[in-house]
């Protein structure tokens, strides 16, 4: 299997996850990547995705596993010829088996358009949002694994995967707290992690060791 | 990407489905340099609907293939986005470059359907462009319209500077060339329009003199007509997300209610070799997992088997489905059904009895309806059937015939397939008399009669197991009929209805019947005047258009309808409709 690390920038960040899934079927077909198909009455291309990124949030660290016998160089080149600049893949990794990205990924880094001191771990973070017509107020500090700074902006490592903390909700809470008129379109996902022996390991590093 | 900040992007994060407004799709074209003139192709309905329209893709690709010309797109924003644009004081802009509509050289609307008329005003309103041509000075672009509704352009003629009657290939680009030349030479809009008027198919309402004829534009060399081999792939699920090939234009069947069947004549087929080549190229360029073979009656295409043979290996290798919309019962064969595995098949007998089918010239016999058994044999369990209520001369016996067909199919199913029972879904539209058909003089049945007939049929179908029934709204059918055969006076009604809140009229949940009723009343017009019978001696609002098929032929067909006499398919021999004056009918 080949895992591609691709981006979701510009107009692509406004696609919903379901639109991305649909688009990939077309991308691999027009890229002419020889992809394997599932068995059964309705065979589908063997494509495996990292957890969804919220609509409006950019990313340079999306991952997709493609069941193909093609080489990583060829898959990367073909993929990049079949997508717009905003979705280009930067790296391809060959893995012996399906790395189960959706199941293994536990965290992701996001850079927020706020100063680094907009969040202090000791203060926690209260989310207040509407889900299915009902107001939800919850404490989210325990799902923020780390806080730091990148180029003067706040960098947070959030739970992502089976236990998740949505970056759009964190953004809304921080926007409210700081009073800064930022736009969700300025949030960017920069890395995703799996947990190995209790420590977070960045996906590229992990894939190389598989 | 630099200009994203100048576009509606900050608004996007607040929109319900932002992917509708971002552009940036695969195969979208954005020209930044050496552009002599810009055309904005507008569709007066949502992105998901407009992106499925083949005509839009054809014109977009054709104009962008010409050096110096740029074509961009704009679709009607949903109401949440419209509210955002208004609250932020922004104007409706194109998807590709974010240029406000009013800064284009030409803004062209695709008018596919009568219930989209208010969508035009909705978009103009959001673009800050006055509705009426006479209110727009030199600072505004030329407003153009085209599409099937141009068969009777009078209801919206006052809104446009020019209207393309017939096929847009070669015509829209010719008008754009004049706009470019006019800009370079300093011509006034009127000077440009006076020249545009000389192009076949171009109707300029402001310069039109009484008694003048406008001849429908026909692209004669259909084999080599511009065709989008790199269609734009929608960002978000469109109604039809698939590669489309157009097998032929026109229709040989001559169903007497069918506007497309008459208006798109002469019949021009594209060779199966060309279609095969195009289908492969489109799949390679887009990655679509489905190829739809489109035409008004796909099973009648003379090259169908050659085409299927040409594509068989390719679709297998690429894992692409073939879809065959618009199959006629008479041309349906089981082997074709085998190759396009789908969950259900759709047929349109249109009427319940042989007598009524003869009246409307739907040359489908009871024996052919039995042909659906082949679909059951091929493994299908679901069949969708389209009918029309309120056809001329219809009686309750004809309606009962619809239920009889369903009962018959159920019986056939049990003979050929298992015990489970088929799913039959019956969908009933209301007959709407349309211009350029032998029924253009007919009345539409009254509103009360529509409800009575629908209820009667519902009662009959309820007794048959496995049959579901859906029907078109009576109110919107009345409105569609009133607008379809409208005259110039209706532009006031459309404008009034829009002011009263009517928009997205084709969406049943948005349809505002009260607004339309009030709009007619406020303008002192009676809807029934438009939906009623027309005298065959009377001059009709669209009589100035030469659509190819002669009025004499339509009248003769009307007489045959009342006698219950059918007319053979044009494939069996020319019936002399007159359309071949405008271009050679390739099946002759």
Image: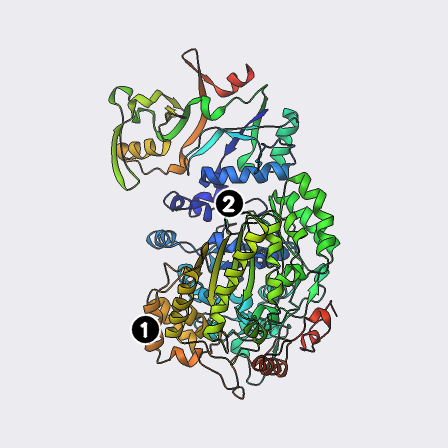
Please, what secondary structure does the residue beneath circle 1 have? Answer: helix
Q: Nearer the viewer, residue B267 or B496?
A: B267
Give the chain of mark 1: B
Is disc 2 placed on a helix, strand or loop?
loop
- Where residue B520 sits: x, y (%)? 36, 76
State which mark lies toward you, 1 or 2: 1
Task: Please indicate, yes or no, whether residue B323 appears anywhere in the rendered image.
Answer: yes
Q: Nearer the viewer, residue B311 or B12?
A: B311
B23 left or right of B501 in image: right
Residue B178 x, y percent position in the rendering: 61, 66
Q: Nearer the viewer, residue B510 or B13?
A: B510
Do circles 1 and 2 both sit on a common chain?
yes
Q: Position of residue B419 (x, y in %)?
A: 52, 47
Residue B518's label in the rendered image is 1
Q: Which residue is labeled 2 in the image?
A: B235
Residue name at image x 49 percent, y 59 percent: B43
Position of the C terminus of chain B by quadrant: bottom right
């Amino acid at each position: 299997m080949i895992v591609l690390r691709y981006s979701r920038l510009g107009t692509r960040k406004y696609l919903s996850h379901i639109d991305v899934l649909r688009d990939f079927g077309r991308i691999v077909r027009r890229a002419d990547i020889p992809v394997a198909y599932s068995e059964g009455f309705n065979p589908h291309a063997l494509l495996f995705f990292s957890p969804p990124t919220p609509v409006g949030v950019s990313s340079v660290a999306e991952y997709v596993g493609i069941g193909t016998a093609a080489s990583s160089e060829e898959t990367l080149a073909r993929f990049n010829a079949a997508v717009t600049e905003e979705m280009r893949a930067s790296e391809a990794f060959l893995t012996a088996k399906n790395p189960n990205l959706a199941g293994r990924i536990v965290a992701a880094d996001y850079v927020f358009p706020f100063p680094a001191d907009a969040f202090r771990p000791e203060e926690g973070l209260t989310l207040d949002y509407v889900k299915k017509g009902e107001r939800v107020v919850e404490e989210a500090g325990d799902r923020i694994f780390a806080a730091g700074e990148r180029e003067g902006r706040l960098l947070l490592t959030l739970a992502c995967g089976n236990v998740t903390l949505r970056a759009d909700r964190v953004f809304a809470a921080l926007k409210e707290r700081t009073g800064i008129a930022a736009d969700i379109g300025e949030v960017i996902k920069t890395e995703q992690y799996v947990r190995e022996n209790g420590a977070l390991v960045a996906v590229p590093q992990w894939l190389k060791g598989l | 990407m630099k200009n994203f900040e100048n576009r509606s992007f900050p608004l996007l994060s607040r929109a319900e489905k932002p992917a509708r407004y971002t552009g940036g799709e695969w195969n979208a074209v954005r020209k930044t340099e050496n552009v002599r003139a810009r055309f904005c192709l507008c569709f007066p309905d949502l992105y998901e609907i407009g992106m499925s329209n083949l005509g839009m893709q054809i014109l977009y690709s054709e104009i962008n293939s010409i050096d110096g010309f740029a074509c961009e797109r704009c679709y009607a924003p949903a109401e949440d986005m419209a509210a955002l644009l208004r609250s932020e004081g922004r104007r409706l802009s194109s998807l590709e470059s974010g240029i406000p509509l009013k800064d284009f050289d030409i803004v062209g609307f695709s008018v596919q359907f009568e219930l989209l008329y208010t969508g035009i005003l909705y978009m103009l309103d959001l673009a800050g462009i006055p509705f009426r041509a006479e209110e727009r000075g030199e600072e505004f672009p030329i407003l153009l319209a085209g599409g099937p509704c141009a068969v009777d352009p009078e209801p919206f003629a006052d809104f446009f500077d020019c209207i393309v009657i017939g096929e847009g290939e070669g015509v829209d680009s010719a008008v754009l060339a004049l706009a470019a030349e006019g800009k370079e030479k300093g011509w006034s809009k009127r000077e440009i329009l006076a020249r545009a008027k000389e192009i076949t198919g171009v109707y300029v309402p402001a310069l039109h003199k009484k008694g003048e004829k406008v001849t429908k534009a026909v692209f004669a060399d259909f084999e080599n007509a511009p065709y989008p081999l790199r269609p734009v792939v929608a960002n978000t699920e469109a109604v039809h997300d698939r590669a489309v090939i157009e097998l032929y234009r026109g229709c040989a069947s001559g169903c007497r209610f069918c506007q497309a069947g008459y208006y798109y004549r002469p019949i021009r087929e594209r060779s199966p070799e060309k279609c095969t080549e195009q289908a492969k190229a489109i799949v390679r360029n887009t990655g679509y997992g489905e190829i739809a073979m489109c035409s008004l009656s796909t099973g009648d295409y003379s090259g169908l088997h050659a085409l299927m043979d040409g594509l068989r290996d390719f679709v297998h290798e690429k894992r692409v489905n073939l879809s065959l919309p618009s199959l006629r019962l008479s041309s349906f064969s089981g082997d074709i059904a085998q190759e396009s595995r789908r969950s259900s098949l759709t047929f349109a007998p249109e009427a319940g009895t042989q007598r009524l089918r003869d009246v409307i010239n739907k040359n489908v016999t009871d024996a052919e309806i039995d042909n659906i058994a082949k679909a059951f044999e091929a493994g299908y369990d679901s069949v969708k059937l389209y009918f029309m209520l309120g056809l001329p001369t219809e009686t309750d016996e004809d309606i009962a015939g619809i239920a009889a067909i369903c009962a018959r199919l159920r019986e056939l199913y049990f003979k050929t397939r298992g015990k489970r029972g088929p799913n039959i879904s019956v969908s009933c539209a209301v007959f709407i008399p349309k211009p350029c058909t032998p029924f253009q003089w007919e009345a539409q049945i009254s509103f009360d009669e529509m409800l009575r007939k629908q209820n009667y049929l519902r009662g009959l179908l309820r007794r048959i197991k496995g049959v579901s029934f859906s029907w078109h709204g009576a109110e919107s059918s009345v409105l569609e009929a009133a607008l379809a055969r409208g005259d110039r006076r209706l532009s006031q009604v459309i404008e009034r209805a829009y002011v009263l809140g009517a928009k997205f009229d084709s969406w049943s949940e948005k349809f505002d019947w009260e607004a339309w009723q009030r709009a007619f009343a406020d303008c002192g017009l009676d809807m029934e005047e438009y939906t009623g019978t027309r005298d065959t001696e009377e001059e009709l609002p669209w009589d100035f258009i030469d659509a190819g098929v002669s009025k004499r032929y339509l009248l003769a067909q009307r007489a045959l309808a009342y006698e219950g006499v059918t007319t053979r398919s044009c494939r069996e021999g020319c019936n002399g409709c007159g359309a071949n004056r405008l271009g050679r009918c390739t099946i002759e």
